[in-house]
Structures are given as structure tokens and as C-alpha cells.
Image (spheres, rainbow, N blue to C red):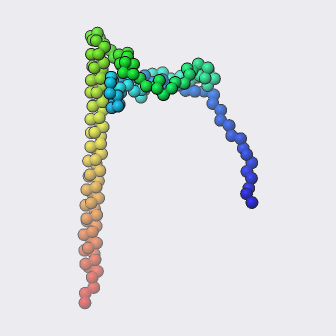
Amino acid sequence: MAKRRDTIQKRVRFDQLEVLEFPMILGDHPACLIGPPVQPSWTPSRRFHQSIDEYELSRSPRRELKALKFSSSERNEIILKMVQNPLNDSPRTAIRKACLEGTEERITELNERMDQLLTRMTMLDEDFEQSRRIRAGSRRRRRAMNSLKTPVL
């Protein structure tokens, strides 16, 4: 006989939303062939709480996937807004400078990460070498003990 379980209704309710807004910054995505790539920053520029009802009333309609992609000119505009241009360079020159600065920062980050990985690898090599010496020493001791246990006829 199959046991019948009483059905329990489970409900979840939401009251407040925490909204985080992230600025767009120069990215490093290799698939961006024309114009500079952009990506959201890791640091939010704005954070606020809102009731779910207010949010649903004020939010814009959902966009199609095609509308979520930036064209190269839109990406250029995003970069130009974030670039400080005290020399009043042309937009093209300002974007190139921003890309070069972003590339230099990225190279610095990657070099720091590489140094950390090399340090860890060195530590692992030292640990491995130490355990190899311990194993070799214990093998020699076992052989010496086994030779002492050999019966003499």
C-alpha cells in the first residue's frame, strides 16, 4: 500500500529588493573585434533598497537579447564618458589612450598573479622534494631492518 502524504502548501514572499548598479568599464573580452570591449565593474556605483511593488511599477520592459549587445559606437561612447581627457584629444585618440592604460593595468594584474602562482609552485616543489627525501630515507631503513631479520643458516 502506498502511503498518502498530506499536501502542505509552501509559500515564499518577497518584500524588499536590494538593487546594485555597476558602471561599465574597459573590458578585455577577445571576441570584441571592432572598438573597445566593455564590461561591468566589480564595484557597484550605487546601492539602494526598494519595495518589490515599487520596482515592478517603475522598471522598464524586458529587452530582447539583441538589444542587450552594444554596438562599437555605443561602446566608444561608454569609454568616452569614463575617460578623462584634459588634453582635449580627439575621441579616437582618447579611446586609444584609455585602451592602452587599461591594457597596462591588466598586464600588471596578470604579472602579479603570475608571481603568486610561481611562489606557490616553488613551495609545492619544496614540499614534494622534502616528502621524496623522507620516503627515500624510510625505504633505506626498511631495507636495513629486513637485512637484519634474514635468518642465518
Residue sitting at x 47%, y 23%: 67
Res 78 seen here: no
Which of 123/28 is in front? 28
Which of 140/26 is in front? 26
Q: Residue furthest bottom?
A: 153
Residue sitting at x 68%, y 37%: 11
Which of 45/1 is in front? 1
* Quarter of the rendering containing residue 134: bottom left
Q: Position of residue 15 (x, y in %)?
A: 63, 28
Residue sitting at x 59%, y 22%: 55
Res 72 seen here: yes
Q: Position of residue 111 (x, y in %)?
A: 27, 35
> Taking 119 as reference, is 66 above or below it?
above
The quarter of the rendered structure image containing the C terminus is bottom left
* Quarter of the rendering containing residue 71: top left
> Taking 81 as reference, is 151 above or below it?
below
> Taking 149 as reference, is 107 above or below it?
above
> Taking 115 as reference, is 101 above or below it?
above
In this picture, residue 121 sits left or right of residue 61: left
Q: Position of residue 21 (x, y in %)?
A: 48, 23
* Quarter of the rendering containing residue 92: top left
Residue sitting at x 33%, y 22%: 35
Number of marks in picture: 0
The quarter of the rendered structure image containing the N terminus is bottom right
Q: Position of residue 19 (x, y in %)?
A: 53, 25
